[in-house]
Image: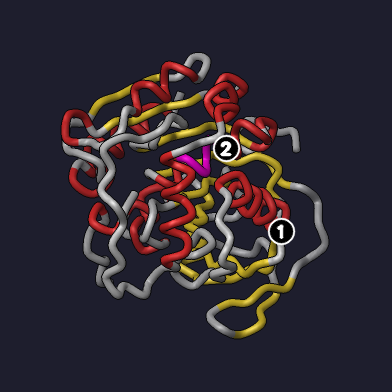
Amino acid sequence: MSAHERRPRCQCALSRPGGSRLRLPERRIRENGAIAAGGDGGRVADVIREAHVNGIKLVYREEGDPAAPPLLLIHGRTADHNDWNGITQHFAARHHVFAIDLRGHGGSDHPGEYPLPEMAEDVVALLDHLGIERATLIGHSLGGVVSYHLATNHPERVERLVLEDPAPPLPLEGRAPLVEDGSTAFDWRMMHDTERQLLNPDPAWLDGLGKITAPTLVIGGGELSPFDSAGVAARIPGAEFVVIEVGHLVHVNGRRPFLQAVDTFLNR
């Protein structure tokens, strides 16, 4: 969740089962800097788009068959959609995948304000823009926090929920102070604002986990993880909990067991 926890950059609403889409007029969106007509068409292969939603610009990668069930990948703090390289392609075999850049990250806007519930509202607004009523969410770290806020406040929008080593909505202890190091791929105001909320979360957020109705899988990184993700799972009704002993970056350091756990969960 902090700058020193990130890994190096990669080079390189009601539904039918599996998610459903609103009937919206054809939209026009930006595709690699040029205006392009939206529409279902054929399979989408690794296209970068942007949408203006909730008062900001969000950049996202789209891949897969537009007729397939929608799935959103939401990265951790300091990362962007590239954090899911390889994993995007894996899920795109059977899903219409959107890997987003959260506000304050990557190509998305840096609005200077980063309330965690509002970051979840950005995602809801993107779903509206895309015409998606319900989607499966997979969120890592900060992305997991954003995902459980969305599932708490908009349970009708979430088909299934996967939380990868999320921070619990309890005061975090023993955190080293943030030290700015000149990194420019994210907004340092986002770092300070989200850190403040992690250290002193709204007490209502913990109770909110009990409002989640989507089938939920929580994946913890085990003894090397800085977070008690088991505590998150315990608060979500019916949530499954899986431990993969590789630390916080489960989808990076334990990609194969991570994908196996998620595939098993999604295939039920």
* Residue 266 visible from this viewpoint: no
**Which residue is denoted by mark 1 in the rendering?**
129
Where is residue 165 drawn, in percent x and y?
A: 33, 36
**Residue 53 as seen in the image, left or right of residue 34:** right
Name the kind of residue labelled 2 in the image.
His
Q: Residue at x 73, y 73 (%)?
A: 28
**Residue 240 as seen in the image, left or right of residue 123:** left
Q: Main secondary structure of the magenta part?
A: helix
Corner quadrant of residue 257: top left
Residue 187 higher or lower than 266, as above or below: below
Residue 101 higher or lower than 242, as above or below: below
Snapshot colouring: secondary structure
Q: Secondary structure at mark 2?
A: helix
**Which residue is denoted by mark 2 in the rendering?**
149
Give the number of the disc on residue 66.
none
Where is residue 12 drawn, in percent x and y?
A: 28, 72
Dot in front, 1 or 2: 2
Q: Is residue 264 magenta?
A: no
Residue 259 higher or lower than 41, as above or below: above
Where is residue 120 drawn, in percent x and y?
A: 60, 47
Residue contact at pointers 1 and 2, CB within 8 angstroms: no
Residue 260 higher or lower than 213, as above or below: below
Name the kind of residue labelled 1 in the image.
His
Where is residue 20 drawn, in percent x and y?
A: 68, 41
**Residue 202 as seen in the image, left or right of residue 139:** right
N-term mark: 1 or 2: 1
Magenta-highlighted residues:
145-149
Q: Residues within 10 Å of mark 2 (few under 14, many from 20)?
A: many
Q: Residue at x 25, y 48 (%)?
A: 176
Furthest residue toward bottom = 34
